[in-house]
Image (cartoon, rainbow, N blue to C red):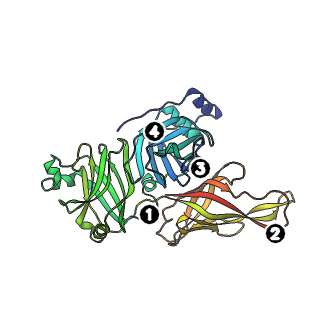
Amino acid sequence: MSIRKFAVPGAVLAAALLAAPAPVYASGDEVYLAAGLRGANEVGAEGDADGQSTVVLKISGNQVTYAARWHQIGTPTAGHVHAGARGANGDVRLEFFGNPLPGGVLGVTGTVQADPELVRALLDDPGGFYANLRDAAHAQGAVRGQFHRLTKPADLNGVLHGGDQATLSARTGGDQETQQAQETEEAQQGGGGDQDGQATWWLGPTGSSVAYTAHWSGLGPVTGGRVHKGAAGPVVAELFTGALPQNVTGVAGVTPVASKVVKRIAGSPGRYYASLRTSEFDGGAVRGRLSGEPFTHPRALTAEVLRGEQIYTCAQQPSGGYAFAQLGVAARLRRGIDHSFVTPGSGPPQWLAPDGSAVRGAVVTRTPNGAGNIPELLLDATQAGAGAGLLAHATQILRLNTTGGVAPTGACEPGAQARVSYGADYVFLG
């Protein structure tokens, strides 16, 4: 694994350290930061107007493990952490990956080593840093978002995978390559598998494509992922091909596959194997038989508001006057999620998916997001619906990239209501 270290300039670090007494973070502590990236957040250069991404960091000592999942941007050519407050550009402080990724990839995980001073500054003031993804059409940045500190752990493989439920799985190892080495192409290439390697696959074969998520350990740089027919049969689907950066430990995406092949894989998964290739084991480093047995896996979902209103009522204030106060919210999110208050005027907020899964939220932190915009929120999530489904994984929710929605100011007539349009991205993490 390559190790990259980036120092923080003295002025930036000094400002962070002088703002408040610096707490001591033990090397075993784990802190999680999350960012919701949008093209509209780019400063000084136009981002991708439709693009979005979720980035989550797990910081343990000087080790930073990252997960990034994106939507409606080109395949990223680079991913970074920059120093810079909202609305201001700043220099790169940490590089996730600096090489283009294979086409069709929609997410990656990986680990980098960070300079201790950078870690301290990130933990002291996460909102003073932002994540940025670049693609071929947006050399300065396709999407960007400021970091927020989470109060609970988040499963990074769920962020990698996204919101859909996979239907097939495989656990793979180099020992399975060894068992088949006399029958497969690996034998002719002097293979036998990477005995230190392990990997897990989650697949979703549908229509004329296969959605895939793979994460691994103990492997050198991964160069491709495949589905084979039988233990010694031909490749029926090249899920991705192309060298991944050395520090990447997981990848997710969607690849086109002939519909008849997709149907066969979905109907008889036990006849097929998933495998990973590496630069050292080009014939195959680890492989494993697909299974259609029911299983669970972590998920994370970002759903933007398609149409929404913050609802206010004119109520008497402690001072004796009248002003608009929150009564509720009415919003429809992507994926058919409805957002409202359980009880008007008192809450709590709730989100209900079409499959019956639901969560309720309790606000933990509020972050101002500029004049005219409601604040960004971090909420603890409590399950309130079906035991399985789109939202059944969620333990915390972020409301990010807010626009509009602020209550009217000035005098109002008692009992009057106001409905104010707003926009936001809701990130559901498990």
- Closer to the camera in the image, 301 or 20: 301
For discs 3 and 4, the disc positioned in front in the rendered view = 3
- The residue singled out by tag 3 in the image is 40
The amino acid sitting under disc 4 is: Glu
Q: CA distance from mark 2 to mark 4?
A: 53 Å
- Check disc 3 and report its element: helix, strand or loop: helix
Answer left or right for 256 relative to 388: left
Q: Look at label 2 and name its amino acid.
A: Gly
- Percent across and percent down for residue 395 are 52, 59
What is the CA distance from the residue labelled 4 to the residue labelled 1? 28 Å
Q: CA distance from mark 1 to mark 2?
A: 43 Å
Q: Nearer the viewer, mark 1 or mark 2?
A: 1
Q: Find residue 95 and name its label.
A: 4
Q: How many numbered marks are there?
A: 4
Q: Which image quadrant for residue 184? A: bottom left
Q: Which mark is residue 254?
A: none
**Which mark identifies residue 164?**
1
- State whether residue 314 appears in this view: yes
What amino acid type should be assigned to the residue bearing mark 3? Ala
Q: Name the residue at 31% across, 70% down.
A: 263
Q: Is residue 364 above or below residue 307?
A: above
Disc nearer the start of the sequence (3/2) = 3
Tags 3 and 2 touching, CB below 8 Å: no
Where does the image place residue 303, in percent across and percent down from the top left?
A: 54, 60
Q: Dot 2: what SS?
A: loop
Q: Do the CB atoms of the residues marked 4 and 1 lie less than 8 Å apart?
A: no
**Amino acid carrying mark 1 in the image:** Asp
Label 2 or label 4, whichever comes before in sequence order: 4
The one of 394 and 182 positioned closer to us in this rendering: 182
- Taking the image as shown, residue 173 lies to the left or right of residue 382, namely left
| Quarter where residue 382 is shown | bottom right
Which circle, 2 or 4, is nearer the viewer? 4
